[in-house]
Image (tube, rainbow, N blue to C red):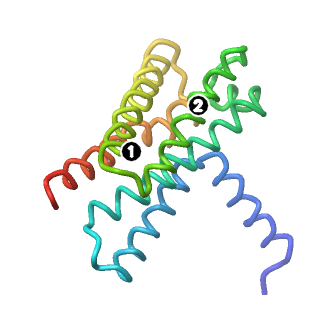
């Protein structure tokens, strides 16, 4: 039988991992919803289902979380990325808030709004990825917040959203 403390430690470790890799946790949650949605609703195209759940969880909720961290816990957020906290942290927070809101709203929005959302996400996230690469190359910054899941989601998620939009426009 498992010791209660061992169970609580495992739960605590899981929560800590999820908060440190919130973007990846939301990506996995989006995949779960995509699979579930595909099973129960065959009327929507695969691209529609992928776009909706990735926009809601991986883009929207993740960006709202990043907003909260940069706005209310700037020292912790900056340290996770390997930065020092500056007044610009709040500006990063507000940009994350904007991306988060458009990601959430685009779940059921028009094609034009979704295209604008994908363009904004591509600019924001690929710009972030370029900054992460520069930090890795120039400053050897390989902290989890700079070179871990946050970097990879900045690279991968815009591709997924873009491919979904291209497929939706092509009627797939």
Upstream in sequence: badge 2 or badge 1: 2
Q: Is residue 168 left or right of residue 161?
A: left
The numbered dot on residue 79 is none
- The residue to which callout 2 is attached is 143
The correct choice, above or below, for 136 with respect to 167 in the image is above
Seen at 62% across and 38% down, the residue is: 66
Disc 2 residue crowd, few under 14, some 14–19, many 20+, Cα 10 Å: some
Instruction: Depth check: give the residue in front, 77 or 166.
Output: 166
Image quadrant where residue 48 sits: bottom left
Instruction: Depth check: give the residue in front, 105 or 91.
Output: 105
The correct choice, above or below, for 9 with respect to 135 in the image is below
Seen at 40% across and 32% down, the residue is: 120
Q: Quadrant of the C terminus?
A: bottom left
Question: Residue lying furthest bottom in this view?
Answer: 1
Q: For numbered disc 2, what is the local secondary structure?
A: loop
Q: Is residue 5 left or right of residue 10?
A: right
Q: Nearer the viewer, mark 2 or mark 1?
A: 1
Instruction: Depth check: give the residue in front, 15 or 6.
Output: 15
- List x then y, in percent, for residue 73: 77, 33
The correct choice, above or below, for 60 with respect to 133 in the image is below
- The residue to which callout 1 is attached is 157
Q: Quadrant of the N terminus?
A: bottom right
Image quadrant where residue 97 sits: top right
Disc 1 residue crowd, few under 14, some 14–19, many 20+, Cα 10 Å: many
Q: CA distance from mark 2 to mark 1?
A: 20 Å
Asked if the residue at tag 1 contacts the one at tag 2, i.e. Cβ–Cβ closer than 8 Å, the answer is: no
The number of discs equals: 2
Q: Is residue 106 left or right of residue 44?
A: right
Question: Residue lying furthest left in this view?
Answer: 170
- List x then y, in percent, for residue 163: 24, 48
């Amino acid at each position: 039988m498992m010791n209660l403390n061992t169970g609580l430690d495992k739960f605590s470790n899981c929560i800590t991992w999820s908060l440190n890799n919130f973007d990846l946790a939301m990506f996995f949650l989006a995949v779960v919803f995509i699979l579930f949605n595909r099973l129960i609703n065959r009327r929507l195209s695969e691209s529609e289902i992928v776009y909706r759940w990735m926009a809601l969880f991986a883009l929207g909720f993740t960006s709202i979380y990043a907003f909260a961290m940069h706005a209310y816990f700037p020292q912790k957020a900056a340290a996770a990325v390997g930065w020092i906290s500056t007044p610009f942290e709040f500006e990063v927070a507000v940009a994350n808030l904007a991306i988060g809101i458009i990601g959430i709203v685009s779940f059921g929005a028009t094609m034009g709004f979704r295209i604008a959302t994908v363009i904004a996400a591509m600019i924001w996230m690929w710009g972030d990825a370029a900054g992460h690469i520069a930090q890795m190359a120039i400053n050897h910054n390989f902290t989890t917040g700079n070179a871990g899941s946050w970097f990879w989601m900045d690279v991968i998620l815009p591709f997924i959203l873009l491919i979904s939009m291209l497929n939706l426009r092509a009627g797939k």
